[in-house]
Amino acid sequence: MRLLLLCCWLCFAAAPALAQGPERTPNPAAAPVSAADDPPAVQQHLFRAAAFAARFQDSEALGHYQAVLKTRPLHYLALCQAAVLSIKIGQRYTDETRKQAYYDAATDYANRALVLRPEGGEANYAAALALFSQATLRHAKGRLAAYRALRSHVFLATEKRPDLPEAWQLLGRWQYRLAHYTVVERLASQLFFGATPAATSMEAMNSLERARDLAPDRLQFRYDLARMYRYQGRRRRAIAELEAAAGIVPITSEDLIVSRLCRQMLPPLLRAAARRERRLHHTLRVAPGAADGLGQPGAGAGQQP
């Protein structure tokens, strides 16, 4: 097990160097690039953090990453993981004060990671996720500012870590949010920031499809895609995603909630699809008589599926 965790950690740490190509010179005090560079006590905390995270015990995993940062405050991996875990834990609270405290901590971790590796895929994903999460707690101007600020981070995250499905999911969510700015939000963005970041629903769906393809067993990706497809009138695609989601076994309590939402969304779509099929079948039955001149002039007009 220790060897497996070490391999996973090494893959995570080495992937940016393989995917990024040339990037800015990292801070000389930055984190080590391999587990062998860490002292034994730090390695032990990393192993335990990875084990807890694999069992979805986020608070315990965060505690071990925080223990690493007490002795190695510039440990890149620990900073990135602590940021993401802080967001995940904060999202579970309904109390905005506690939620904000976790989001603030995540922002701090992400910013420290960015100082170490300004173009690191993991650091930019953590920073983008923190901004996206903070936006939900801000008033209109602050929310628009957060969405604008995360643009460079989320694109760097997908560029430097194209293998990270969570980065593509975040990109898709952000693009869809921009594509559906209200008139007031667009005017306010122009007024306060001089421009509105551009994105389309098609780009959002493409990004989420990329996330889904990278991790087809993630219920949240299927659910997000199904919602987008439904809103865009792509009923068949939405049904396909929801039916695929029905075959995925929930693991966490969050998965159970998403699975239930998928089951609730599917029946209305199936009924709507059945109604459309009936209308189409009726139209096809009427149309031949009209084409042969057997019906009244204009028979079947307006009976589009």
Image (cartoon, helix red, strand yellow):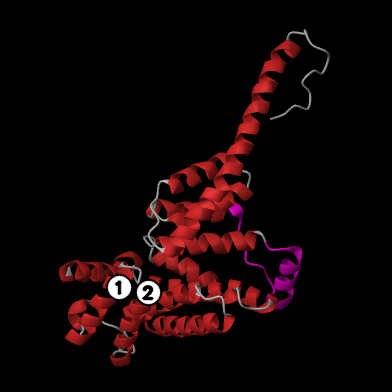
Q: What element carries label 1?
A: helix
Per the image, the residue denoted by label 2 is 58
Give, as a three-letter code, the residue at label 1: Phe
Residue 21 in percent (x, y) is at 33, 68
Per the image, the residue denoted by label 1 is 52
Q: Is residue 114 above or below residue 298?
A: below
Q: Is residue 103 left or right of residue 142?
A: left
Q: Is residue 277 left or right of residue 119?
A: right
Residue 137 in percent (x, y) is at 61, 77
Residue 230 seen from this side: yes
For marks 1 and 2, the one nearer the N-term is: 1
Quarter that holds the N terminus: bottom left
Quarter occupied by residue 35: bottom left
Q: Residues within 10 Å of mark 2 (few under 14, many from 20)?
A: some
Q: Is residue 293 above or below residue 81?
A: above
Number of marks in the image? 2
Whether residues under marks 1 and 2 lie with C-beta atoms below 8 angstroms apart, the answer is: yes
Q: In this view, does 17 lie above or below 293?
A: below
Magenta range is 181-201
**Would you say residue 227 sits in the magenta stretch?**
no
Closer-to-camera residue (2/263) = 263
Residue, far bottom: 71
- x 39%, y 72%: residue: 122
Give, as a three-letter code, the residue at label 2: Asp
**Would you say residue 192 sits in the magenta stretch?**
yes
- x 46%, y 63%: residue: 254
